[in-house]
């Protein structure tokens, strides 16, 4: 089959996207046709060997019911332009916090285990069934399928690290000890369960459910139905103080709240992993104050107490709790350096630290707390502490490409550009000699750490294809894992000012998850006749989410909640900067100050409909310096009181970036 075959994915893509004419794009987005064409020409030129571009995205793409498909659209574009695997290319997530990348790598999301291994599913009774259902399958003889053929090695090494001597071949290396959730367990689902009275207690660590939302008023109701709530945080939050929210009657709330003072990140050492996957070790800046403890110490203490109770009193299926390894100098106060060594993994036969995930085995002789970090902490020491940087570029970056391989450590194996085999042609020569990723010198690949066997001759007929982690060995234009379809399609938000110009009868994503509807509650989606303006939420430079509402200097820079209003709309409404305004949706309201701006102008959608946008910074609530000084004014400062409780079909990400509101001066 060639790319000209009518049933090839390439031809299907062409047919699918042929509907997205410049006129249609302008109708959907409001971008003038000439502006769109100018951008399209510029982007199209990036498909030349001596040109490259990157796409950097953040929650502006993810916070939609179509977030996964929006990101995949960019990835498709980069694949077609040949910009994957090249220095300066790729589809790059710009993380919103210093360590969101590290959190994700270590399985903060419910559906994965560390290193992006899948959480086992009900009915998977052994490792064979789990690997068969989870690991990629080779579909091309020249596909290395590295992830697929090593999946079992990674999983067994993880289980061996967690359960030690209790993980044996005879019991499938304690595979039965791993939970196998039968329903979605994302954070929105947790609060939905609480709202339905099916959750007894919740522990929050560095996450304030009330502020984060969505639909903060429903989250508040959910917290009020709990028997207990544990909040581990450095300072009070809108969750630890949820009973103080407007409309909440504290005397009628039976939730027992425990606020456990935890250290802020400046009070402990550890690592931050940036958007480029560089794991950089940091030192403690100041010692903890008062009774504050590290959150991992709090969890270790709680675990020890629970384990003691099970040992004394017994219980159902206590084996996973009794077997969990805590091989630290002080199991109640593990050091982050010890945990970093454990994450790296160990050869149990020799006692040495593992140097590469390629050496992990499925016979119980190796451990790895997170296989993608194997090599970060060998016997030589913690490579995340390295700091050979721009003080001597010639010595520290001999490639001249900004790789700086001895500054910190990046997963996997200190590689700075993933899939970098795609940066060179079939003969191993860089597409752009001025910007080589890796290149073949006749005997080995040089430059960046190759995402490829270091000595594999590119001219060998058996040479692997460049995309080594999937079964095809090539970039995936057609996805078999996206739950909302193999090729991206535009859908309007669940609250939109216009019907979908492509297909008005199926305007929104038909497979997004509607929490209220699924629970038998009213959907409470607003309509454009009552809520004519599009709102979007975002962060400001001066604040770090919500915690900095306790920092007087930062509060001084941005002291109170406000919304940004386009000049034209403000003129129509008679609103001036500093006026108090009420912004309302079908779910709640804000009462904040107005900031009239020319940053947000009207856009024209669906040919001739003028639409205004309201900008809503998210950082405020009824807790913090400003809120304490202005208790009446700060009652309705929760931005996510406005947002709908709907999630995309995959990760159940909320739709924070587009919803309908009204605004009025009061």
Image (cartoon, grey):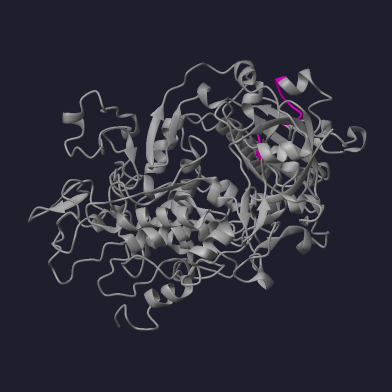
Q: Is residue 11 left or right of residue 175?
A: left
Question: Which residue is painted at 64% across and 42% down in the image?
Answer: 537
Say if residue 174 shows up in the picture.
no
Near-viewer residue (583 or 437)? 583
Say if residue 74 shows up in the picture.
yes
Magenta region includes residue 622 = yes
Most extreme residue toward the left, as rendered? 442
Does 181 appear above or below 534? below
Question: Which residue is painted at 13% across and 68% down in the image?
Answer: 460
Near-viewer residue (216 or 209)? 216
- The percent coordinates of residue 659 (x first, y second) are 69, 51
Question: Which residue is painted at 22% across and 49% down in the image?
Answer: 437
Most extreme residue toward the right, as rendered? 251
Near-viewer residue (78 or 263)? 78
Does 57 appear above or below 567? below
Q: Is residue 113 left or right of residue 246?
A: left
- The percent coordinates of residue 389 (x first, y second) are 26, 28
Q: How many marks?
A: 0
- The percent coordinates of residue 511 (x first, y second) are 64, 67
The image quadrant where one finds the N terminus is bottom left
The image quadrant where one finds the C terminus is top right
Question: In this picture, which residue range is highlighted in magenta?
Answer: 615-625
- The percent coordinates of residue 12 (x first, y second) are 43, 77
Question: Which residue is painted at 58% across and 35% down in the image?
Answer: 300
Magenta region includes residue 522 = no
Task: From the image, give the main secondary structure of the stretch colored magenta.
Answer: loop
């Amino acid at each position: 089959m060639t790319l000209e075959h009518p049933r090839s994915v390439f031809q299907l893509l062409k047919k699918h996207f042929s509907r997205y004419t410049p006129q249609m794009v302008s109708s959907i987005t409001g971008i003038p046709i000439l502006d769109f064409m100018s951008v399209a020409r510029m982007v199209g030129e990036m498909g030349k060997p001596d040109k490259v571009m990157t796409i950097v995205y953040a929650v502006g793409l993810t916070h939609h019911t179509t977030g996964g498909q929006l990101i995949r659209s960019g990835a498709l574009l980069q694949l077609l332009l040949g910009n994957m695997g090249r220095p300066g290319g790729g589809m790059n997530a710009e993380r919103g916090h210093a360590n969101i990348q590290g959190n994700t790598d270590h399985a903060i999301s419910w559906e994965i285990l560390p290193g992006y291994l899948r959480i086992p599913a009900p009915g998977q009774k052994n490792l064979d069934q789990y690997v068969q259902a989870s690991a990629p399958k080779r579909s091309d003889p020249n596909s290395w399928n590295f992830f697929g053929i090593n999946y079992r090695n990674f999983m067994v090494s993880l289980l061996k690290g967690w359960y030690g001597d209790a993980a044996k071949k005879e019991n499938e290396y304690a595979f039965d000890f791993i939970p196998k959730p039968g329903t979605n367990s994302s954070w929105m689902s947790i609060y939905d369960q609480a709202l339905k009275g099916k959750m007894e207690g919740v522990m929050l660590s560095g996450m304030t459910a009330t502020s984060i939302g969505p639909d903060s008023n429903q989250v508040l109701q959910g917290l009020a139905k709990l028997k207990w709530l544990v909040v581990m945080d450095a300072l009070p939050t809108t969750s630890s103080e949820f009973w103080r929210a407007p409309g909440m009657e504290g005397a009628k709330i039976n939730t027992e709240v425990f606020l456990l003072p935890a250290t802020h990140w400046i009070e402990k050492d550890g690592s931050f992993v940036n958007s480029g996957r560089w794991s950089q070790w940091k030192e403690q800046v100041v010692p903890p104050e008062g009774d504050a403890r590290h959150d991992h110490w709090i969890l270790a203490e709680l675990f020890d107490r629970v384990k003691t109770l099970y040992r004394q009193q017994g219980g159902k299926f206590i084996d996973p709790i009794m077997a969990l390894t805590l091989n630290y100098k002080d199991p109640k106060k593990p050091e982050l350096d010890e945990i970093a060594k454990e994450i790296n993994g160990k050869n149990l036969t020799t006692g040495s630290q593992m140097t590469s995930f390629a050496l992990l085995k499925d016979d119980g002789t190796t451990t790895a707390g997170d296989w993608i970090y194997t090599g970060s902490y060998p016997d030589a020491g913690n490579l995340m502490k390295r700091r050979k940087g721009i003080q001597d570029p010639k010595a520290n970056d001999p490639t001249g490409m900004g790789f700086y391989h001895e500054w910190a450590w990046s997963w996997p194996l200190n590689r700075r550009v993933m899939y970098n085999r795609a940066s060179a042609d079939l003969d191993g020569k860089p597409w752009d000699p001025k910007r080589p990723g890796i290149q073949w010198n006749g005997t080995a690949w040089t430059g960046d750490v190759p995402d490829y066997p270091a000595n594999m001759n590119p001219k060998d007929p058996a040479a692997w294809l460049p995309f080594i982690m999937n079964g095809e060995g090539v970039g995936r234009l057609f996805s078999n894992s996206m739950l909302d379809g193999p090729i991206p399609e535009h859908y309007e938000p669940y609250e939109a000012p216009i019907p979908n110009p492509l297909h008005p009868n199926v305007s929104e994503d038909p497979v997004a998850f509607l929490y209220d509807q699924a629970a038998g509650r009213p959907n409470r989606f607003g309509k454009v006749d009552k809520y004519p303006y599009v709102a979007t939420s975002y962060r400001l430079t001066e604040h770090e989410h919500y915690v900095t509402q306790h920092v007087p200097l930062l509060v001084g820079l941005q002291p109170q909640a406000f919304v940004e209003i386009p000049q034209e709309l403000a003129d129509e409404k008679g609103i001036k900067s500093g006026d108090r305004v009420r912004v309302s949706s079908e779910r709640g309201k804000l009462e904040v100050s107005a900031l009239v701006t020319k940053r947000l102008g009207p856009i024209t959608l669906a040919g001739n409909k003028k639409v205004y946008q309201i900008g809503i910074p998210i950082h405020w609530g009824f807790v913090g310096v400003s809120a304490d000084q202005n208790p009446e004014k700060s009652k309705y400062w929760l931005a996510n009181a406005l947002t709908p409780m709907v999630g995309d079909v995959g990760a159940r990400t909320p739709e924070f970036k587009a919803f309908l509101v009204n605004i009025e001066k009061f």
